[in-house]
Amino acid sequence: MGPLVSLIVLILLAAIAGWWLMRPKPHPVIRYVFHTLVPSAEPSAPAATPIATPAATPLPSAAPAPSPTSTPTANAQGPQLALIVDDCGQWIATERGFVALGIPLTLSVLPDVPYTSIIATEASDAGKGVMLHLPMETLSGLNPGPGKVTTEMSDAQIVAQVQSDLAEVPLARGVNNHEGSKASADPRVMRAVIGVLAEHKFFFIDSKTNAASVGEDTARQMGVPTAARDVFLDNRADVAYTEAQLSQAAAIAQRTGSAIAIGHPHPTTLAAVRTMIPRLQALGVQFVLVQDLVGKNGP
């Protein structure tokens, strides 16, 4: 019986070993968004970012992006509304949600943040506008992030910094200030900044983070196409609040012919814009790229 028992044990061991080698193996799960590998959660905001960090929670599945809507011509009839999404390059999932919207809008991209190049390229490829969101010194002392322009810089240093920031977003065709409540109110600083834009034949949008800003006036004096923000959409990260701000922007456009509204890549802002697009279009509001609204006073 001894050899028989040994044979049975060997057969059982061989069967167990065979099962172990041939067992089904689990596959790793990889998350893809728009065919690009991204982290499972959006990156946390840099410490310098003044806008509250959008929650890194999964967004509802977005419908496939429709073909980009053609931009109305300069003599298009009806009120025109330009949407700018600031602070881009940090929260890629939400920013891609804006890119997927079937209306003209503009993404303003920060220099030297995790997704600067990626989101600028994707926005441009989708027919959206791309701007440099130029960090500038604040009155509060809050650091606006890498690439900032400060009032302590010489004119030459400002020019070099703006040139460096523009190189980070080569697809940009215009600039607006990120923060900058102190720097944008300094005539010398703004002359140096606008001088670089004049060389590149770029436009300038004054974010109006300070009522005393001289950005728009300086740009106009130097022959650079310019305009200023009319409404901030999301000082509160709340869908209903942002919808009300969009209605306010539309009312300004209906009264004056055009308006510029600035929002940020918050999931609540994206949800509000999605909801309001058909409502505002039903009122005759046309969405346009902000470059179509800048003053035609350039050289």
Image (cartoon, rainbow, N blue to C red):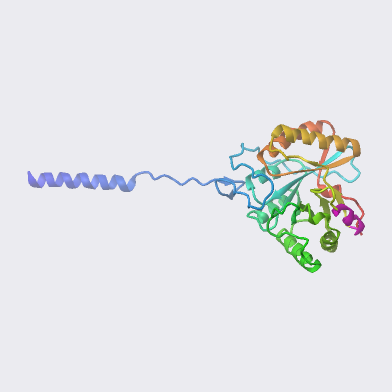
- Of residues 69 and 193, the one nearer the viewer is 193
The overriding secondary structure of the stretch rendered in magenta is helix
Q: Residue furthest front?
A: 140
Q: Residue at x 89, y 41 (%)?
A: 76
Q: Is residue 59 at least partly visible in the picture?
A: yes
Magenta range = 214-223
Residue 223 falls in image quadrant: bottom right
Residue 9 in the figure: left or right of residue 188: left
Total numbered labels placed on residues in the image:
0
Front-lying residue, 223 or 151 = 151
Tell me the quarter of the picture where residue 185 sits.
Answer: bottom right
Q: Position of residue 177 (x, y in %)?
A: 78, 53
Residue under the point 88% across and 54% down = 225
Q: Magenta includes 221? A: yes
Q: Quadrant of the N terminus?
A: top left
The quadrant in which the C terminus is found is: bottom right
Q: Position of residue 106 (x, y in %)?
A: 76, 47
Would you say 35 lies left or right of 245 here?
A: left
* Percent of width and height locating residue 21: 32, 48
Q: Residue at x 66, y 44 (%)?
A: 52
Q: Is residue 10 left or right of residue 32?
A: left
Rendering coords of residue 268 (x, y %) = 68, 37
Task: Report if residue 234 lies within the magenta region.
Answer: no
Q: Nearer the viewer, residue 106 or 74?
A: 106
Q: Residue furthest bottom?
A: 156
